[in-house]
């Protein structure tokens, strides 16, 4: 018999343990006792609710509705029960919430979803999510992963199993009234409170369209910091000084996150008023929690297709004003929110303003990256990258070779992605973990040229970074240590800087890029020239990144073995220096691909790496 069935009979109900659900509540400032043994949890103080509904608030009617929701609240308990059940009464969905959700579900009520509910974790394991309903409901969860006794292989009896830590997240987009919690074990104990992560934000921080309230990025963040969440976020909210002045005193606040500003784009509002509101609000916050680590975010990305920014909005001034006003408080840290989520339509639940469920994890990861930057030295980053690349697949070879030469500045190094920049300004990304690769590009990349060793991220780089020109490339790596055979009849020598005029004349009519690369090889002492008597008939060199190229032979001297001889001689030179010859070759360069295969290079498909360029490069 399941626990919910046991609740239907007084005889079996007496076998259960029970307690008021409010006993286990975290993330609420106060509670109110109501009829029928129900308790209303409030995340807003009474003064805070009055401020939200005051005549000077932007949208007092909306704010009063949203302030009543249970965003960020969680029940935390320990129990040895096999199954638990929670009694609650759902509030009606606020009309202001539905106005936003229509952008997700459409206007047909038959297609509407709650996008909200209660979710449970047991010892960190995600259990069933229960979508928000109507009226009174009892929801239950089975806690044990293994229902059999490990020694006897018999059904485990309630109360004789291990103790579990359970979290039940209450809905973000509506309120609830709490009744009882029941268990079929012998213990139901509250988990002690932790210091607070206090969040003051708008609908994104409140948890709009995250589906599961546990998935809201601020909930993920607070949990990662081992903090309880007190979420004072309200959909449609902006910087309202009268609300900041009501922030409660006497709380153990370890961190504060302020995520406001996006809603200024919808209405006309003067910059002078914006500056006053931000300055007054942040000053009140600083006075209330002077010792708390405080982060102030600039607005997240948004799209203009559905809702265009009001022509007299102060939206363009929000980020600079936040930066200036944050600087008045040394302990406040400004966080650039414009790269915390992606800009592509698929990243938004509603296609324009609200990051979807998957994007919540992206925001949390990138927020951690910006607020806790890597403090390793250049030498430590290079050493860490070397260890990772030593076991990397073939496509990482260009990055590995340049790392060996010490010619890279590492921007990001982790097991999931490595982003580096060479002396020529080309960035290189190796990312076995695609999400980490996207994070590194979004937060660290500023290049006009990106050698992407993960071509599946090319569309992301085009959308997020503007690198819209894509050049697929073959990677050719010389196999083994065997020297190439070069006939003695080919006279080949290293060209010095004194040959610059001769080389320039040889290059007359070639592409500007080829000219620059060959002259760069000449200045570096890595350019070989082939001569027939005194006539320079061909050249080959090394690019600054250590790859072979370009190779040029005069048209009248082609098909006489000069290309093979020049490259073979360069290969032998590199082998003698203990280096591995390699090249990147465009797919349309068929003669070059054929030459490298004949010389003993292993040529990879062109879908393993590509060069991305900004549109004007």
Image: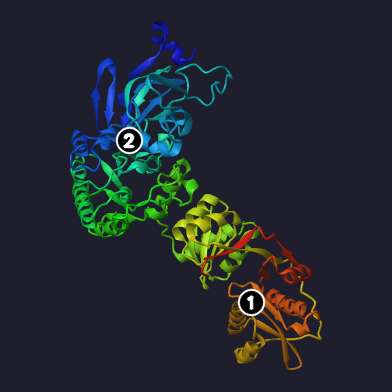
Give the residue drawn at x 46%, y 12%.
Answer: 5
Q: Residue 501 carries which label?
A: none
Q: Name the residue under label 1.
A: 542
Point out residue 446 in the picture as x, y percentages from the top left corner. 46, 64
- Front in this rendered view, residue 354 or 231: 354
Q: Which of 589 and 567 is in front in this view?
A: 589
Q: In which quarter of the image is residue 83?
A: top left
- Of the two numbered discs 2 and 1 on the same chain, state the one appearing first in sequence: 2
Residue 455 vertical position relative to residue 246 in the rendered view, above or below: below
Is 474 displayed left or right of 127 in the figure?
right
Return the x and y of residue 31 as percentages of the image width and height. 25, 27
Q: Residues within 10 Å of mark 1 (few under 14, many from 20)?
A: many
- Give the residue at the far bottom of this rendering: 534
| Residue 250 appears in the figure | no
In the depicted structure, whether residue 356 falls above or below residue 164: below
Question: Considering the numbered disc 2 on the image, is that residue within a helix, a strand or a loop?
Answer: helix
Q: Which of marks 2 and 1 is in front?
A: 2
- Circle 1 — which element? strand
On the question of residue 111 being in view, the answer is yes
Q: Residue 96 carries which label?
A: 2
* Nearer the observer, 407 or 563: 563
Q: In this view, does 133 lie above or below 214?
A: above
Query: Along the line of sight, which residue is nearer the eye, 579 or 153?
Result: 579
Q: How many labels does the image show?
A: 2
Q: Classify residue 518 as left or right of residue 381.
A: right
Say which residue appears at 22% left-offset and 48% top-offset. 285
Image location of residue 101, percent across then percent down: 40, 36
Query: Looking at the image, which residue sits at the far top?
Result: 11
In the image: residue 538, left or right of residue 616 = right
- Can you give x and y, in whole percent of width and height, for residue 106 in the image? 45, 36
Relative vertical location of residue 390 with respect to residue 267 in this rendering, above or below: below
């Amino acid at each position: 018999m399941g626990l919910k069935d046991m609740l239907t009979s007084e005889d079996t109900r007496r076998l259960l343990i029970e307690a008021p659900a409010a006993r286990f509540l975290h993330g609420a400032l106060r509670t109110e006792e109501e009829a029928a043994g129900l308790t209303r949890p409030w995340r807003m103080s009474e003064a805070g609710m009055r401020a939200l509904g005051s005549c000077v608030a932007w949208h007092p009617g909306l704010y009063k509705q949203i302030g009543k929701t249970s965003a960020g609240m969680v029940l935390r308990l320990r129990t040895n029960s096999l199954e638990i059940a929670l009694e609650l009464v759902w509030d009606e969905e606020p009309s202001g919430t539905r106005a936003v959700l229509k952008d997700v579900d459409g206007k047909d009520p038959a297609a509407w979803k709650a996008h909200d509910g209660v979710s449970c974790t047991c010892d960190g394991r995600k259990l069933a999510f229960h979508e928000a309903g109507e009226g009174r409901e009892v929801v239950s969860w089975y806690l044990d992963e293994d229902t059999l006794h490990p020694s006897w292989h018999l059904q485990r009896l309630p109360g004789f199993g291990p103790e579990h830590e359970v979290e039940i997240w209450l809905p973000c987009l509506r309120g609830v009234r709490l009744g009882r919690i029941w268990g079929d074990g012998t213990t139901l104990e509250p988990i002690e409170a932790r210091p607070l992560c206090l969040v003051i934000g708008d609908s994104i921080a409140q948890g709009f369209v995250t589906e599961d309230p546990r998935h809201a990025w601020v909930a993920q963040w607070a949990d990662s910091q081992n903090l309880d969440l007190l979420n004072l976020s309200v959909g449609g909210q902006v910087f309202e000084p009268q609300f900041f002045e009501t922030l409660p005193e006497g709380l153990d606040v370890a961190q504060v996150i302020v995520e406001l500003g996006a809603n200024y784009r919808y209405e006309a509002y003067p910059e002078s008023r914006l500056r006053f509101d931000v300055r007054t609000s942040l000053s009140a916050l600083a006075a209330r929690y002077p010792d708390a680590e405080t982060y102030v975010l600039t607005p997240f990305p948004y799209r203009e297709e559905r809702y265009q920014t009001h022509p007299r909005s102060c939206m363009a001034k929000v980020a600079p004003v936040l930066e200036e006003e944050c600087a008045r408080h040394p302990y406040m840290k400004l966080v650039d929110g414009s790269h915390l989520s992606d800009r592509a339509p698929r990243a938004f639940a509603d296609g324009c303003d609200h990051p979807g469920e998957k994007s919540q994890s992206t925001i949390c990861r990138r927020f951690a990256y910006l607020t806790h930057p890597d403090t390793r030295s250049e030498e430590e980053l290079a050493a860490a990258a070397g260890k990772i690349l030593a076991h990397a697949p073939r496509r990482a070879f260009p990055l590995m070779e340049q790392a060996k030469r010490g010619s890279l500045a590492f921007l990001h190094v982790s097991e999931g992605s490595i982003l580096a920049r060479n002396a020529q300004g080309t960035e290189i990304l190796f990312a076995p973990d695609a999400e980490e690769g996207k994070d590194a590009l979004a937060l660290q990349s500023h290049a006009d040229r990106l050698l992407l060793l993960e071509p599946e991220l090319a569309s992301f780089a085009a959308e997020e970074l503007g690198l819209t020109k894509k050049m697929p490339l073959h990677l050719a790596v010389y196999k083994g240590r065997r020297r190439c055979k070069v006939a003695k009849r080919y006279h080949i020598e290293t060209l010095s800087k004194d040959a610059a005029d001769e080389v320039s004349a040889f290059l007359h009519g070639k592409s500007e890029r080829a000219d620059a690369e060959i002259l760069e090889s000449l200045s570096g002492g890595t350019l070989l020239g082939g001569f027939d008597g005194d006539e320079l008939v061909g050249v080959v060199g090394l690019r600054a990144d250590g790859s072979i190229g370009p190779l040029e032979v005069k048209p009248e001297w082609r098909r006489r073995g000069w290309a093979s001889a020049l490259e073979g001689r360069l290969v032998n030179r590199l082998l003698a220096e203990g280096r591995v010859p390699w090249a990147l070759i465009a797919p349309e360069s068929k003669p070059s691909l054929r030459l490298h295969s004949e010389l003993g290079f292993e040529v990879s498909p062109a879908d393993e790496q590509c060069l991305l360029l900004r549109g004007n490069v």
